[in-house]
């Protein structure tokens, strides 16, 4: 049985960094699916295409030259041959990704690619519909979350470290707006799968969260 760990959760819950650490501890791969949608969002912004125009976004996705490489240094996302791993982490790209991910044909293409990758190897996959759509039969499903205020605080601190002048109130508003959009999109909205384990990180340290998920995975490995 493949050790596939599916992880969902809202923006700012720390899914990517937690998944990186869990993958390293377990010696498996981490696939950041959100990066795939972010790459499409970045492509739309670069070509000045309105992300609200579904037909044009679907056409853009069909011709998207996207490659995801996973190595010891983590995942690298390549768009048109360029490593855009850092460029896709801006608030503008984040909102664009949230919009383009609503479109059924876009998600259909991305999900097929994600399922193909997961079938070939043990990995942890994070996103917003992994437990419910991408890997519904994964042996371990996690719904990672935290309060909006805590998620905004974490993101605000990261932005401050990078010299971004945004205020905490602005970041909190962005987090709440993203939650509203993700939970109410018409195609595969963000929700907790019935059999997903809820992990609320509001009052937990990074290491505590990683340890909690690793322990659950090790139980599966031992067949307990």
Image: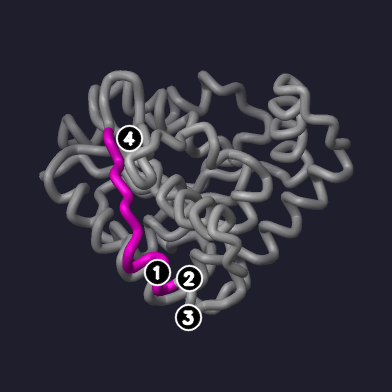
> Which quarter of the figure is the N terminus placed in?
top left
> Quick check: is 59 in the magenta stretch?
yes
Identify the residue position indicated by label 4 in the image: 30
Q: Are marks 1 and 2 in contact (CB under 8 Å)?
A: yes
Q: Is residue 219 above or below residue 72?
A: below
User: In the image, what residue occupies the spot 73% across and 29% down?
Assistant: 159
Question: Alpha-carbon distance for marks 1 and 4?
Answer: 22 Å
Q: State which tag comes first along the sequence, 1 or 2.
A: 2
Task: Name the disc covering residue 57, or none.
Answer: 2
Q: Are marks 1 and 4 in contact (CB under 8 Å)?
A: no
Q: Position of residue 34 (x, y in %)?
A: 46, 49
Is 215 left, or right, of 171 in this rendering? Answer: left
Q: Is residue 169 above or below residue 97?
A: above
Q: State which tag comes first along the sequence, 3 or 1.
A: 3
Q: Residues within 10 Å of mark 4 (few under 14, many from 20)?
A: many
The nearer-to-camera label among 1 and 4 is: 1
The nearer-to-camera label among 3 and 1 is: 3
In what element is the residue under mark 4?
Answer: strand
Q: Residues within 10 Å of mark 2 (few under 14, many from 20)?
A: many
Coloration mode = one colour
**Residue 175 or residue 221, whichever sits in front:** 175
Q: Are marks 3 and 2 in contact (CB under 8 Å)?
A: yes
Q: Which residues are magenta?
A: 58-69
Task: Name the disc covering residue 55, or none.
Answer: 3
């Amino acid at each position: 049985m493949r050790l596939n760990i599916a992880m969902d959760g809202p923006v700012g819950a720390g899914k990517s960094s937690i998944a990186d650490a869990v993958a390293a501890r377990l010696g498996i791969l981490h696939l950041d699916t959100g990066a795939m949608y972010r790459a499409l969002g970045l492509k739309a912004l670069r070509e000045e295409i309105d992300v609200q125009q579904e037909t044009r976004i679907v056409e853009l996705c069909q011709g998207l030259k996207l490659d995801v490489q996973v190595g010891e240094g983590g995942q690298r996302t390549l768009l048109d041959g360029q490593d855009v791993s850092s460029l896709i982490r801006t608030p503008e790209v984040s909102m664009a990704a949230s919009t383009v991910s609503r479109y059924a044909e876009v998600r259909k293409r991305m999900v097929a690619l994600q399922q193909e990758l997961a079938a070939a190897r043990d990995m942890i996959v994070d996103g917003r519909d992994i437990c419910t759509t991408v890997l519904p039969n994964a042996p371990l499903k996690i719904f990672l979350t935290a309060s909006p205020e805590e998620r905004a605080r974490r993101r605000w601190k990261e932005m401050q470290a990078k010299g971004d002048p945004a205020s905490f109130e602005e970041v909190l508003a962005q987090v709440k707006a993203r939650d509203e959009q993700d939970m109410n999109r018409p195609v595969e909205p963000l929700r907790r799968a019935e059999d997903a384990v809820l992990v609320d990180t509001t009052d937990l340290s990074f290491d505590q969260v990683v340890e909690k998920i690793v322990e659950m995975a090790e139980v599966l490995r031992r067949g307990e």
